């Protein structure tokens, strides 16, 4: 299962941990995904959405 928001497509970001001695090691940051029941095409579905999309309310919640 991909760690990607189903509305905005936000996924992992890649960067470096940088120590005081300027040593670099690869690091990944993942979005804060939550499972939410939404109404899509008249049916209730579970979707993995990032918290930013949940706060925006860019979807219709299922009751």
Image (cartoon, rainbow, N blue to C red):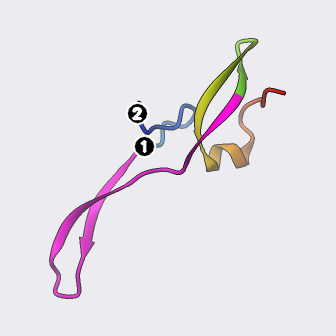
Of residues 54 and 34, the one nearer the viewer is 34
Give me the disc on residue 11: 1
Q: Find out whether the residues at labels 1 and 2 contact each other: C-beta distance under 8 Å.
A: yes
**Quadrant assignment, res 39:** top right
Give the labeled residue for mark 2.
2
Question: For the N terminus, which image quadrant?
Answer: top left
Q: Main secondary structure of the magenta part?
A: strand
Q: Position of residue 38 (x, y in %)?
A: 71, 27
Q: Position of residue 25 (x, y in %)?
A: 19, 67
Image check: 20 left or right of 61? Answer: left
Q: Which residues are magenta?
A: 12-37
Q: Is residue 50 magenta?
A: no
Image check: 14 left or right of 54? Answer: left
Rendered view: 48 above or below 16: above
* Residue at the image position 52 percent from the left and 37 percent from the top: 5
**Quadrant assignment, res 14:** bottom left
């Amino acid at each position: 299962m991909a760690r990607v928001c189903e509305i905005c497509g936000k996924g992992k970001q890649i960067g470096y941990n940088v120590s005081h001695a300027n040593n670099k090691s690869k690091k990944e940051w993942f979005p804060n995904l939550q499972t939410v029941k939404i109404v899509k095409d008249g049916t209730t579905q579970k979707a993995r959405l990032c918290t930013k999309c949940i706060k925006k309310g860019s979807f219709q919640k299922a009751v």
